[in-house]
Amino acid sequence: MPVLVFGTLIVLGALDPLAGLVGLGLCVAGGFALAWYWLAGVVRLNAALRRAAEEQGPFSAPLPAPRLPAIGEIEEGLARLTRSLQTRAALVVQLRAADEAIVEALPDPLIVLAADRSLLRANRAARRLFGLAGEGLSRGDLGALLRHPVMAAAMDRSLADTTPQPVELVLPGAVTRDLSGQVLLMQPPLADGGRLVIMLTDRTAARAVERMRVDFVTNASHELRTPLASVMGFIETLRGPARDDPAAQERFLAIMAEQSERMRRLIDDLLGLSRVEMSEHQPPEGEVALDVLLRAEAAAMEPLYAARGIRLTLELPDAPLIARPADADQLGQVARNLLDNALRHARAEVRLTAGPARQGHRDGVVFSVRDDGPGVAREHIPRLTERFYRVDKGRGRGAGNTGLGLAIVKHILTRHRGQLTIESELGEGASFRVWIPGG
């Protein structure tokens, strides 16, 4: 507009041409300056918007005074809006971190799945329940859980009618687990895409206690009936016919003492087996120097071997044998039970050997106890680890065998993810080989 005015005045002669040209030039320069100011403000505003969109904090340092009030007001408003959004974003991050910490600390296992049932995350309890692979859930164990017919049906029902679906299942594996819980459908999905949430409770220990109570009553009542009846019979005899017979009294009291000792051993072994079954589903922690442990157990058993005239030969390496993870008390019980079992059947010698051993793709350690006794027929070998199973019931009871020693060994090795191998031929003795993870 100013350019048009100056041009008209010059053409009409109302304005000196030189002065008109100067005025016209000043107008043009002023227009360019004003446009530059606006463009600079718009460029700065665009840069601020871009940094805000990238969450880089556009106003970390004070801005220079704005050249135009309108642009400055917009920049100030944007600064306030950005600070408010950043505060809210930081609060959201804190709340999310708190939620994740709470979920991670839950004592019960929790698993989050996507809509296609792929694993998104699992808390610490779930990773511990299904086996640690670093900090990740074992895919094989997770697959077994999700493929279980009961769990698959519960997830199908949850997706269909959106209500929580209860589950009760038994998950097979190295240790059979009794699980209960719920499958929940997330509507809307979680921030990470989680669609299904599985909450579980491991009832393995509780169910083991229930079974242990029933088994203890059943087994104890059955096994204690005979020695208890024997003791009661001798008491009646001592009160009656043998009341004035010192020789009979001495003989009967010796038998009663033997039967009482048998009942004590039986109760001790039943309680020991119950304790082992209680912890069977919980992997051990720590490590054990197996060579040191075996030497200590052999030294403790040496007086019993000497009393029976049986030679105990050790073949242990000089290098350390480390079992991990392992429970020293329980592995000591395995060694004692096997050495005691060999002592009852050996004729002249028992050999205890140990060394490193690799089984499949896993490093470990192995020890074996071999006796030169009568051996075991092949058909009996698979049943030797059953509770109260005796190849020769009469001879076993007479030798102080409760029929629980090898059952205890089996359950301890199950907890350690180990393996017991029994080899025997009639007349050739028997060998009990124990493999434990380690190295």
Image (tube, helix red, strand yellow):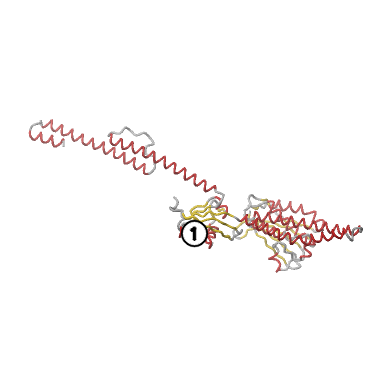
Name the image quarter holding residue 298.
bottom right
**Are there few (<14), some (14-19), or many (20+) residues within 10 Å of tag 1?**
many
| Residue at 49 percent of width and 46 percent of height | 99
Q: Which of 107 and 398 is in front in this view?
A: 107
**In the image, is 213 to the left or to the right of 312?**
left
In the picture of the structure, the residue carrying the numbered disc 1 is 155
Residue at the limit of the structure toward the front, as seen here: 240
**In the image, is 240 to the left or to the right of 85?**
right
**In the image, is 210 to the left or to the right of 348?**
left
The spot of residue 232 in percent (x, y) is: 82, 59
| Residue at 92 percent of width and 58 percent of height | 244
The spot of residue 172 in percent (x, y) is: 59, 61
Q: Is residue 205 above or below residue 72?
A: below
The spot of residue 27 in percent (x, y) is: 18, 34
Q: Is residue 20 above or below residue 215?
A: above
The spot of residue 165 in percent (x, y) is: 51, 57
